[in-house]
Each structure stands twice: as structure tokens, then as C-alpha cells.
Image (cartoon, helix red, strand yellow):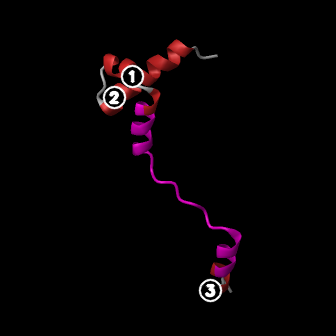
Amino acid sequence: MTTFAARARRLAGWAGVTFGWRPADFWSATPEELATLVEAMMPEQVTPPDAMLIERMQEAYPDG
């Protein structure tokens, strides 16, 4: 089991490498501030096609 201290140390190091944060920056930031930066770095989520779209595509482009 990983302790809170170990996880915090790893996350602080990651924030330092990724965002250039010093330890004081990490410890004074709120979880919301860190989450905002992390989310900004994530690629946009693409919604997979639903069953109706797949059916229309199969009709339009048969593999025949």
C-alpha cells in the first residue's frame, strides 16, 4: 500500500517537471488548481459512435 506521503512526493515531483513548480508552489496550490492544469494537458475526449451511427456507416460503406 502506498502512503499519502509517497503519493504526494511523487505528485509534487511530477508538478515540478511538468509545470515548473517548486515545492512551495505545489504545497500552496489547491487540488482544483492542480486538476485544472492536469485536465488542460489531457487530449480531448472523443465520443465513440453509437449503434445508429455505426449502422448508417455500414449501409453507406458496405464491405461487400
**Badge 3 density bin: few <14, some 14–19, many ≥20, Cα 10 Å:** few
Q: Which image quadrant: the N terminus? A: top right
- The span picked out in magenta is 33-56
Q: How many marks?
A: 3
Q: Which residue shows up at 48% across the image and 18% down it?
A: 8
Element assignment for label 1: helix
Q: Which residue is mark 2?
A: 17
Mark 1 and mark 3: span between their CA atoms?
Answer: 51 Å
Q: Earlier in the sequence, mark 1 or mark 3?
A: 1
Q: Earlier in the sequence, mark 2 or mark 3?
A: 2
Q: Which residue is mark 1?
A: 13
Q: Which residue shows up at 39% across the image and 38% down it?
A: 37
Q: Is residue 46 above or below residue 21?
A: below
Q: Is residue 43 magenta?
A: yes
Mark 2 and mark 3: span between their CA atoms?
Answer: 48 Å
| Residue 61 at x, y percent in the picture | 61, 84
**Badge 2 density bin: few <14, some 14–19, many ≥20, Cα 10 Å:** few
Mark 1 and mark 2: span between their CA atoms?
Answer: 6 Å
Q: Nearer the viewer, residue 35 or 45?
A: 35
Element assignment for label 3: helix
Q: Which residue is mark 3?
A: 60
Q: Is residue 35 left or right of residue 62?
A: left
| Residue 24 at x, y percent in the picture | 32, 16
Secondary structure mostly seen in magenta is helix
Q: Is there CB contact under 8 Å for labels 1 and 3?
A: no
Q: Which image quadrant: the C terminus? A: bottom right
- Displayed quadrant of residue 36: top left
Q: Kindly identify the amino acid type of the residue bearing the numbered disc 1.
A: Gly
